[in-house]
Image (cartoon, rainbow, N blue to C red):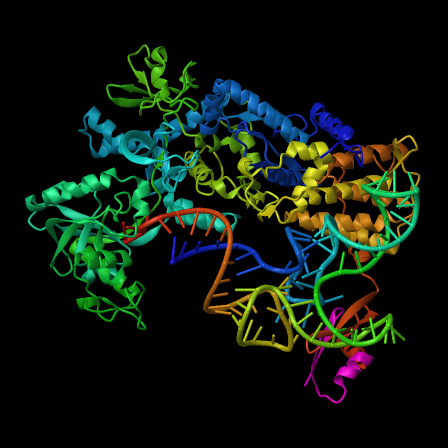
RNA sequence: GCCGAUGUGGCGGAAUGGCAGACGCAACGGACUUAAAAUCCGUUGGGGCGAAAGCCCCGUGCGGGUUCGAGUCCCGCCAUCGGUACCA
């Protein structure tokens, strides 16, 4: 935008008020026990998803969510809450490191620079954070506690009976009693198998381009979520977190959360809980058994072959000599396929016969054992019983390889092709005639009695691959001695990464920390773990660190945690409002819930869930209705908007754009609209002199409000209050516009109206509100005291909203035909007869029969004629 | 394929089952101005009748249904966006 006259001097007073808030620490909030803490006030913890301070700078999408929470924070303060509204930096991880590699700057330097820029950008929006609580995940005083929490995981096991984490020492005691003769090695191996943090050699997602492994959640369509590079599966020795132990609780406790249903559904689907049965098929002529998982045990009589995943451990065992060459050829073929190819070619099934047979435990019939890559080693038992008559995939496979298809479920009504629904069991001996549901129960009982199966639950969720081959992350507080891992004592925390000159990926699976010669070896002969933690580690618990950011004794102060997380009594617990994008649905939001539950089990926090209410802000698209991107040239920079229209306009526009949750396109002329509105507010109180100076308008005076004006004022209080509570900012702003329009034409602007308006406007456009408040205070010191932001929130009087006369809608057969003004509270009977007497109604009813009259007092009369 | 969300003027959007289109943008007309910008006032879903006041018809993706009354509730489609993808 070319330089032009500002409609009001936002460029002068916005920075002024930002400095004022900063210097006076206006939005600092004390903890319980601190000076100035007011225990009589209820608490409200409103949280933003903290940003990665990337080199790109702040985006209008950030500004949207941050503005929404800021409005709530300011509003709740005015409602008398102790409001916790903090901000910090998620500065470890791939984006920061990649930026550093690109610019040749050390990541710690780049991070400091980037976060300074981010902070300056946030402050220019006028966000009311308590900057005294700022945190940074790359600060040793912070990640010391990330490492400490890792040690809690490492030193815990999941007790399936109590369904909770317990200290590993308790498992050690239990084991000592049940197996007193364990050797030290046996005992250690047993404990290591049960830790919530453990090491395993398993096929992992390796991204050669990034030089690191990735979690399942970070791989999208066979490519890395960051950068979009190809990902291959390869076995590597890695740290895992036992999130699968919490699968049930992570699903069940979703029900207690005020989260969007869509996000809950995403998490449920991701966890993918399936109820079914595990059935063991003995291998013919062998002692081996093949356990399979199925959700349809009722179709067991229709199982005509088994399929093992190519990576299944029994493959080598069961393969006959005659088939060995063919099987090995197939395995090589599969192994060289990338994940991408494997999914791309998903529709044509491939496989090979092992030559072996298994015995179907219900009818003792032998069934061939095949190998096919449509069976995944990572799900269930890595093997399936194929029921081609009632499963699309098995059907396709059986058709291709000429395997038997045996129908065992009769469809309720005829269907074409393979029937996969529920029906009645047939050709299934003792199951015949039973419904699918009954048959499932019956067969499971049978299997349990026979000792060849049991009811089982399977999850799609995998354990969380927790190590990365990166420099810019938290080092593990772990050392290795004689091939065993050991925890470092808490007194050794934080484990600070070595100051490496060359921190780039090694190009091999070796982590960059392998280059840190002296750092690796400790004096006691142990060597350090060289992997680092993933990006998500720091963000798994940052909302707790805000509660006592400087605490050097504990990861969170216990009293502060009880107060702000509200675990003791009260209907609300945890973070009261958490706003952020949907992109973290199965990443951060799942990981953080997992960590929180572990901390809860171990008695470190007082709530089962971290985030009580979650709201997803929708994406802001470019003016062309496409995702903002540099290549499209449709990116809007919030700094530019602030320079041209001011921070209040940016805030107001982002909120006026549409519902917070909706995806909506940016429009520059829309910004001008709210800018004009703010300028109209300004001119309600201010006028320009001949010299172009702004001064308090002579039209501002104390005067009585007309009843119409009073009604608008009180309707505005009501609407704005209700809308802010519901995060319906767009309609709150619309009502404020109506209110301002009411007074724009008034020759005398009443002080009372201005006062209320500025208070209502304060959370949304705090700079303008504060500035006008201060200026009006000069002329009307008794009406405008203190800061606008410190005013109590106004209440509306319902009496002012109702009038003596109401307009009633008259309908004939549901169609609007006339309106009539009547006394409010007029009885049904009186209203009906008055309506029927109206000339228009008479005209429509003349010569017809009135069949029915629907009367809604004070609202509507509908005459049904026939 | 499956799961979820969304379909309302030229555009962003608003409407506890009860006046569809609040508010804003854009557009048009007027006032102010030498002129423009800015500002202020007004008009603005589509169609028809009327000189005018006014009146009538159509209209919330499509097709059905429930109801005195449906943008809103139910059933069946279509389209767009997001997630997921051989999960047995």
Residue A479 versus residue A215: which sits nearer the camera?
A215
Name the residue at 87% across, 55% down: A707
Quarter occupied by residue A647: top right
**Seen in the image, is A280 located left or right of residue A570?**
left
Q: What is the count of numbered marks? A: 0
Residue A821 versus residue A26: which sits nearer the camera?
A821
Q: Does residue A142 appear in the picture of this structure?
A: yes
Magenta span contains residue A154: no
Residue A441 versus residue A178: which sits nearer the camera?
A441
Residue A339: x %, y % from top left: 31, 41
Which quadrant of the figure contains the C terminus of chain A?
Answer: bottom right
Residue projecting furthest to the bottom: A847
Q: Does residue A45 appear in the picture of this structure?
A: no
- From the viewer's perspective, is residue A180 above or below residue A850? above
- From the viewer's perspective, is residue A54 above or below residue A860? above
Residue A220 versus residue A50: which sits nearer the camera?
A220
Which quadrant of the figure contains the N terminus of chain A?
Answer: top right
- From the viewer's perspective, is residue B65 above or below residue A806? below
Magenta span contains residue A865: yes
Quarter occupied by residue A93: top left
Residue A794: x %, y % from top left: 76, 45
Magenta stretch bounds:
A838-866
Residue A650: x %, y % from top left: 68, 38
Name the residue at 71% across, 88% down: A849
């Amino acid at each position: 935008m070319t330089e032009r006259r500002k409609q009001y001097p936002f460029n002068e007073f916005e920075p002024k008020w930002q400095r004022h808030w900063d210097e006076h620490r206006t939005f600092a909030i004390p903890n319980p026990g601190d000076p100035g803490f007011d225990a009589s006030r209820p608490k409200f913890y409103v949280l933003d998803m903290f940003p990665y301070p990337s080199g790109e700078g702040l985006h209008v999408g950030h500004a949207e969510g941050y503005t929404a929470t800021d409005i709530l924070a300011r509003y709740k303060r005015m409602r008398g809450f102790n409001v916790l509204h903090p901000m910090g930096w998620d500065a470890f991880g791939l984006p920061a490191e990649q930026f550093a590699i690109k610019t040749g700057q050390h990541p710690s330097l780049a991070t400091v620079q980037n976060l300074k820029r981010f902070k300056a950008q946030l402050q220019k929006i006028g966000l009311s954070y308590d900057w005294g609580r700022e945190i940074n995940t790359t600060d040793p005083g912070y990640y010391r506690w990330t490492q400490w929490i890792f040690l809690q995981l490492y030193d815990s096991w999941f007790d399936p009976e109590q369904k909770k984490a317990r200290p590993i020492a308790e498992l050690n005691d239990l084991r000592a009693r049940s197996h007193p003769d364990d050797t030290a090695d046996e005992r250690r191996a047993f404990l290591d198998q049960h830790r919530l943090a453990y090491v395993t050699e398993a096929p992992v997602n390796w991204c050669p381009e990034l030089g690191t492994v990735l979690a399942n959640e970070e791989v999208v369509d066979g490519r890395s979520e960051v950068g979009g590079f190809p990902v291959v599966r390869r076995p590597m020795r890695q740290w895992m977190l036992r999130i699968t132990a919490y699968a049930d609780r992570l699903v069940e406790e979703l029900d207690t959360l005020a989260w969007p249903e869509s996000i809950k559904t995403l998490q449920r689907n991701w966890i993918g809980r399936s109820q079914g049965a595990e059935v063991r098929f003995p291998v013919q002529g062998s002692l081996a058994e093949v356990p399979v998982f199925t959700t349809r045990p009722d179709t067991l009589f229709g199982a005509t072959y088994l399929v093992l995943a190519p990576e299944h451990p029994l493959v080598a065992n069961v393969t006959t000599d005659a088939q060995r060459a063919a099987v090995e050829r197939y395995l090589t073929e599969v192994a060289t396929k990338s994940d991408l190819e494997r999914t791309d070619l998903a529709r044509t099934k491939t496989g090979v016969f092992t030559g072996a047979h298994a015995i179907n435990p219900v009818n003792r019939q032998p069934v061939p054992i095949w190998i096919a890559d449509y069976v995944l080693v990572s799900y269930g038992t890595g093997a399936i019983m194929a029921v081609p008559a009632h499963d699309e995939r098995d059907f396709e496979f059986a058709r291709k390889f000429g395997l038997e298809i045996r129908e065992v479920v009769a469809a309720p009504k005829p269907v074409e092709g393979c029937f996969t629904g529920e029906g009645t069991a047939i050709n299934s001996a003792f199951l015949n005639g039973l419904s699918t549901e009954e048959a499932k129960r019956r067969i499971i009982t049978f299997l349990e009695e026979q000792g060849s199966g049991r009811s089982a639950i399977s999850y799609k969720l995998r354990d969380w691959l927790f190590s990365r081959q990166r420099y810019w992350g938290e080092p593990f507080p772990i050392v290795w001695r004689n091939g065993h891992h050991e925890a470092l004592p808490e007194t050794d925390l934080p484990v600070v990464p070595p100051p490496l000159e060359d921190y780039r990926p090694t190009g091999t699976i070796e982590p960059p920390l392998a280059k840190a010669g002296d750092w690796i070896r400790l004096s006691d002969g142990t060597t350090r773990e060289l992997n680092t933690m993933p990006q998500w580690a720091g963000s798994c618990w940052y909302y707790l660190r805000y509660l006592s950011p400087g605490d050097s004794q504990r990861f969170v102060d216990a009293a502060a945690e009880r107060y702000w997380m509200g675990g003791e009594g009260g209907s609300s617990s945890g973070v009261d409002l958490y706003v952020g994008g949907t992109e973290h649905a199965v990443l951060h939001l799942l990981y953080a819930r997992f960590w929180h539950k572990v901390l809860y089990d171990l008695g470190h926090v007082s709530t089962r869930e971290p985030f009580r209410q979650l709201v997803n802000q929708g994406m802001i698209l470019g003016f062309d209705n496409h995702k903002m991107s540099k290549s499209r040239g449709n990116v809007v920079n919030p700094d530019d908007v602030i320079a041209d229209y001011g921070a209040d306009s940016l805030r107001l526009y982002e909120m006026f754009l549409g519902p917070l949750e909706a995806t909506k396109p940016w429009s520059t002329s829309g910004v001008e609209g709210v800018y004009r509105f703010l300028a109209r507010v300004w001119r309600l109180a201010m006028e320009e002199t001949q010299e172009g100076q702004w001064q308090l308008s002579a039209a501002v005076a104390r005067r009585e409000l007309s009843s119409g004006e009073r009604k608008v004022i009180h309707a505005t209080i009501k609407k704005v209050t209700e809308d802010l509570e519901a995060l319906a900012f767009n309609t709150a702003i619309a009502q404020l516009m109506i209110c301002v329009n009411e007074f724009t034409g008034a020759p005398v602007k009443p002080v009372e109206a201005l006062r209320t308006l500025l208070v209502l406007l304060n959370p949304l456009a705090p700079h303008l509100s504060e500035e006008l408040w201060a200026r009006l205070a000069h002329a009307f010191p008794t009406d405008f005291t203190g800061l606008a932001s410190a005013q109590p929130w106004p209440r509306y009087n319902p009496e002012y909203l109702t009038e003596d006369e109401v307009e009633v809608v008259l309908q004939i057969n549901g169609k609007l035909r006339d309106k009539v003004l009547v006394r409010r509270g007029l009885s049904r009977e009186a209203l009906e007869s008055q309506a029927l007497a109206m000339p228009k109604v008479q005209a429509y009813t003349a010569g017809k029969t009135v069949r029915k009259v629907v009367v809604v007092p004070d609202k509507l009369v509908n005459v049904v004629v026939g």
